[in-house]
Image (cartoon, helix red, strand yellow):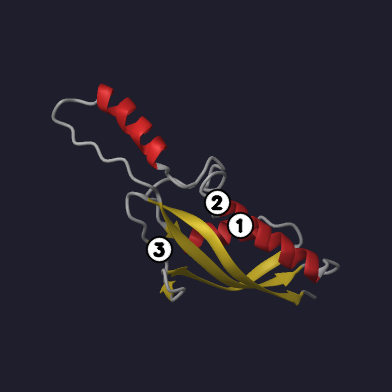
Amino acid sequence: LALTPELQQEVTAFLDERRLLTTQLAVREAGYKRIAVQVAVVARPGTDAHRLRTDVHQALDLFLNPLVGGLDGTGWPFGREVYLSDLYTCIQQVDGLLNVQTLQMAWLDETDQPHLGERKIDLLAHEVAISDIHVVTVEAGE
């Protein structure tokens, strides 16, 4: 999803012809805020733990996807925060899940340093969320 110089020129020229005279135009590459999740879940009785772990990973990867993620599945909106409650909703929809025991999220900077998000992670206007490494622990339910 890189913005090549040619594409940047093409988009700038297209928008420049249509902008108001007083509007300043700046075309830049999107910023990606890498989101990592650590979650402990309890499986329903009879649910395969390995399968549930894989399904939770896939649900998070899909939800935190710039192109097909977000609440409506049409891509992560620019500048939209990542809320812990949204991640709960995403995970709780996975088949075979009894409940979510613990859930933490963090964003990773350029040096892979994690920064914990209590209830939400803020994004700048040009940023979108993108899935990073997740740690999913599954406990067998009774």
Helix, strand or loop for disc 3: strand
Please provide percent x and percent y for residue 84. Answer: 48, 63
Q: Is residue 108 above or below residue 93?
A: below
Q: Using the numbered discs, state the Cα–Cα distance from disc 1 to disc 3 in whole angstroms.
A: 17 Å
Q: How far across and down, in percent of the image, does residue 15 sit?
A: 30, 28
- Front residue of 59/93: it is 59
Residue displayed at 18% across by 32% down: 23
Rounded to the nearest whole Å, what is the CA distance between mark 2 and mark 1?
6 Å
- Quadrant in which the C terminus is drawn: bottom right
* Mark 1: few/some/many CA within 10 Å (<14, 14-19, 20+): many
Mark carried by residue 18: none
Q: Mark 1 sits on what residue? A: 61
User: Residue 65, labelled with which disc?
Assistant: 2
Q: Which residue is mark 3?
A: 121
Tell me, yes or no, whether the two marked residues, 2 and 1, touch with CB atoms within 8 Å.
yes
**Which one is closest to the eye, mark 2 or mark 3?**
2
Sequence-earlier tag: 2 or 3: 2
Task: Kindly check if marks 1 and 3 are in contact, taking CB atoms under 8 A apart as contact.
Answer: no
Which residue, as the protein is rendered here, is positioned at the far front? 6
Q: Element under label 2?
A: loop
Helix, strand or loop status at disc 1: helix
What's under tag 2, amino acid-wise? Asn
Q: Residue at x 41, y 74 (%)?
A: 115
Q: Residue at x 13, y 30 (%)?
A: 22
Q: Residues within 10 Å of mark 2 (few under 14, many from 20)?
A: some
CA–CA distance between discs 2 and 3?
Answer: 15 Å
